[in-house]
Image (cartoon, rainbow, N blue to C red):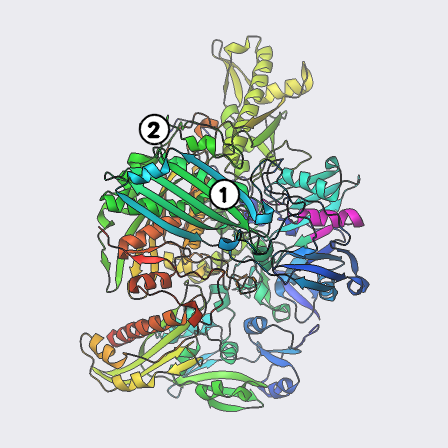
Amino acid sequence: MDEKPRKRTHVGRSVTKNDSLALATAQERFTADYPLESPLHCAILYSPHAHAEITCLHTEEAEALPGVVDILSFQNVARILHTSAGQGYPEPSPYDAVLFDNRMRYVGDRVALVAAESLEIANQALRKIRVEYNVLEPLFDRQRAMDEGVPRLHGGEDHAKIPVAYEPEKNLAAEVQIAFGDLEEGFSQAEFIEENDYSLPAASHCALEPHAALAYIDERGRLVIISTTQVPFHTRRIVSKLIECPLHRIRVIKPRIGGGFGGKQEVILEPLVALVAWRNQRPARLVLSRREVFVSTRTRHAADLHMKTGAAKDGSITGLQMDCLLEAGAYGTHSLTVLSNVGAKVLPLFNKIENLRFHGRSVYTNLPVSGAYRGYGATQGYFAFNQQIDAVTRWAGQDMVEFCKRWHIREGETSGVFKALGEGKEGVSQVVHSCALSRCLDRGAQAIEWKKKRGKHLRVGEDKIKGVGLAVAMQGSGIPLIDMGAASMKMNEDGSFNLLVGATDIGTGSDTVLAQIAAEVLKIPIEKIIVLSSDTDLTPFDVGAYASSTTYVSGQAVKACAEKIADQILATAATLLETERENLVIESESVRDPKTERTVSYEEIATSATYNRDQYQIQAQASYTCEESPPPFIAQFAEVDVDTKTGRIEVLRFVSAADCGQPINPVLAEGQIEGAVVNGISYALWEEYRYDKDGRMTNPRFWDYKIFTARDTPEIQTILVHTEEPSGPFGAKSIGEVAINGPAPAIANAIYDAVGVRIRDLPITPEKVWRGLNNTEHNEASDSAPATDKNRPTRSERGNSP
Amino acid sequence: MDEAQWFFPDNLDQVPEILSREGVVPHGGGTGILWGGMTRVRGLMDTGRLDLKYARDQNGSIVLGSALSYTEAAEALAKADHLLARSLSSAATEPLRNRISLGGSISMFPYWSDLMGPLLALDAELSLVGTNSGTYPLSEYVQKRELRQKSLITSIRWPDVPWRGAYYRHTRTPTDRPAFSITVLVLRKSKRIEEIRIVVVGCSGRYRRLTEVEQAIQGAEVPAEPDDLIDAAAPQPGMDFPARMGFSAEYLKACASVELKRSLAAALRSSP
Amino acid sequence: MTGSLHINGTELRASFRGNELLLDVLRNLGCTEVKEGCREGACGSCLVLLDGVLVNSCQVLAASALGREITTVKGLGTFHEPHPIQEAFVEAGAVQCGFCTPGMVLATFALLKKNPKPEEAEIRKALDGNLCRCTGYVKIIEAVKLAAERMAHHG
């Protein structure tokens, strides 16, 4: 079915983002730009040990320093177990953290906080805090985390809030298992078995703006927090609990945010500044350095995957087994839900596989803490999945594009995985209503010139060979039956509207997208909608910016709210035009009676309702919780040139063809795809956390943690393929995450296409390719290079391309 | 150090006295000083008013003032498509190229320098003012720590010879620092290689002139396809590297061998 | 030490220590349009023009900027009279979170002053000191091309 975009006025238009000019001229304020009156500047003392008990903590010398006002540590801050995960309540992440512990669980864990008259004094005071540690044996190898006799990080009162598998005494932060059919039977039917290990490292979001938080007490004694948060409402709730202050005395305001990508879907700094402000009745300010962001905020979950795929002669998959080990790091925030997503967002894609099993575990280690990161488990899963498919199709002598077209889930179909795997709890059954993945595959293949390049080993110059690779993926749109967003609108007498949403614009442009939805319903220019978002005092609830939920969930709330407003407008118009409501139609900023051709403008309606007759405030509110999570789909293609003498990889072109339903704002949708693609390519080729033998991160700077610049990107092409999602606002689904899932496997598949070397662990470095080309294993013992956290030889093999 | 004192001399005569003070260092762009940390720096002598930003042809030599930034030096040399222009304009990033000074970079000489390979290959000389006033070959300057004390590099010069050359930097990403670099300079008289110079920076020992390879190629006639000549000259070029930047020592060595041959081929093929 | 900093055409008296960075001095003077992203000269959030030359203010000691012309993004255009480069960024959809945008605008300005008709490779090189994690640089490069086109027409 070739879907044509419907004719709409504002939806589907690339409206300029309503804050673009203010951002480009630096009018807008980010958290660290807000002035505070006589603030207390905060600095944090971090643990130098990966695993230790604090036996002695002396702050007297530091306190005596002139200008030091407060010092927080386990000695004077209540131990309240919580999770820092910005998730709905009750959170599916274990309650295994306190604000200040006397047990340190990673290099970078929090020992104490100093609040002083200046940042310089605060930093000086840090150096005067005397700490004595009983150093404990650390655990760095996630593969051994559940073995007998290894160090334990948690236990005691740590607990899961919802009934899920959680065994801290075994270092198990989460466990998920599902199975369908008979896997052994499925493998016995297979003519070909592809069984491999895959591995991905931790990565940093590298949002340009470092984490920051401010807190002050307002004129009425309420605590106000301004911070770099993706989750203002969760922040309010968690801060209330942690500083033991009633929720109604706390206000959280989200200002402009300089990117989040999941790294700011946590409540890390806010309780600290809140505590300082509350205790001292003075404003408090905490801005992290880039190093602190790398080490002491959150990372992507490092993962080991084991996949076994059985195929029949015709290529059909007779059995699929996916085992996943995620590294939670020192605390288990997001570890159950990311784990669930590894299976939940990957396995339904090829829904005809009858015999399948997914088994995953998240384990604690004494390393930096993993959390939410764009893709959220799907990225890890798809890296393995797409390489397995590439291998199976090669064996079967089939083209991977055609294979994916044949086997992907279709409109009207479902998968048992939807119900079996939710975000931690049981999932929600759903049927796919919109899916253009086949069209995405066709259009993407055409754009990359797939047929011309695939399997051809085209030579480029003397030493380079060209290859193309494909990866397919889906994600979700919100978390069904859990994510809720709400909107309220009121009409002003000039025919303009205030739209208040809890939804959190972190640079995505959701304020504008939501305004477009409202404008579409009410048939008004976008400029007449004034958006205010993410202020817990003024805007209704929203879970926040995560799970690709804003357009789909918050958008439906806005649409429903705008429709209620439209009702009221029509009702007042009917009175003014002395006719029945049913006779009237809404047009551009006015209401018309088609029979009499009489019209009344919005301005007239609003003025009448406000001042003149049957006065009332035209206003409405609506909430929305999604009952399903319609997946966006994407087909992504990479073209690479591989230098056969050095293994150097050049990504020349990257094409993404995506089905996100009706893109509300095509330029913004493209922007989401492009940003995710470059992040994904950067992760595929360069990014990883490196540690020394004591668990200290050795590359917490851009000097040694490389991300893409404008000089590095390939030619990037983005194709939006249209569908209409019936359950979404004006046919929309989501686009925030899915595009980050394809780059790594597409590039790995392209390298294999070029030179027959398969790299199954990220990052795909030239050296790994070179070793694959020369069939040499890396002997780390012969190097003086710092050891990585796993001393496993790189996995690559020279294969025979068909 | 809590307080660092600043000096802004406007005459080179003032320099020796200022630099004789304890803990005072010359400040060009300052990027090297910030890199090294300022704990032992008691004073900074800014070179901005000493008129050390110039590029001249002088008596058959190219002379560059030490306060030139990478960008300024590259622009001055770009007209001649000088190899140094190419190496400097691929170093670091735009705003850093605008700030790193030649003098500061030479005195720091990190393994990742994009400046030192070409300068060493060019047999550059430095003029110093201060405790060690005088002119020194760069190769001597880098060997003798004491020359870097209490002295300001004022200019860099080398004979203006119509070299053809190639420059290779081995990085993870284009804006990355190089794990090593290879500079090849070739002087040809029609098909004959009059002179060849090869400098590797970043190998064990910080840098090396590959004199064995030079000797094997010097004087030869360049064939249309120089690969055989290169293979014969550089089978085992004898470069060793420490593991760094995520590369193993073995891999760096293998890459250096490949890229050396490629650089030689590029340098030999470039038209006179 | 105390001295005059010329910021966007205005002279401001500032007191700071000899080892203080220009970035911190500027922000303490209220120039919050100059952002801190990494403090190691890698991300470009802190870019300013120093005598017209693009530099990382986190890699410049404030004392060495005394008596020099400092231009921040607010010296190029305002909300009510934006610079054509800023307008181009807005139009091309090159502004997502906006944190990198002031630095990108300044880098574009520095490029187009030297090279009014840059090739794409030259654009990428001129912006290689500006990190962006939101856009993938695609629309930023388009914005620079658009700005170059516009400024060429208007002289």
Q: Which quadrant is home to the N terminus of chain A?
A: top left
**Residue toward you, B40 or A778:** A778
Which residue is identified by label 2?
A3
Chain letter, disc 1 residue = A
Residue A748 counted in the magenta span = no
Q: Position of residue A579 (x, y in %)?
A: 55, 8
| Residue A493 relative to residue A421: left or right | right
Q: Secondary structure at mark 1?
A: helix
Q: Which of marks 1 and 2 precedes in the sequence?
A: 2
Tell me if residue A33 can be seen.
yes
Q: Residue at x 70, y 67 (%)?
A: C16
Q: Secondary structure at mark 2?
A: loop
Residue B38 position by quadrant:
bottom right
Specify the label residue A261 is tagged with: none
Q: Residue furthest left?
A: B224
**Residue toward you, C42 or A681:** A681
User: Does residue B264 sit above or below A361 in this rendering?
Assistant: below
| Residue A540 relative to residue B154: left or right | right
Q: How many numbered marks are there?
A: 2
Amino acid tagged 2:
Glu
Residue A217 position by quadrant:
top right
Q: Position of residue C46 (x, y in %)?
A: 57, 59
Q: Which residues are magenta?
A: A258-285
Tell me if residue A662 can be seen.
no
Amino acid tagged 1:
Leu
Which residue is identified by label 1?
A339
Chain letter, disc 2 residue = A
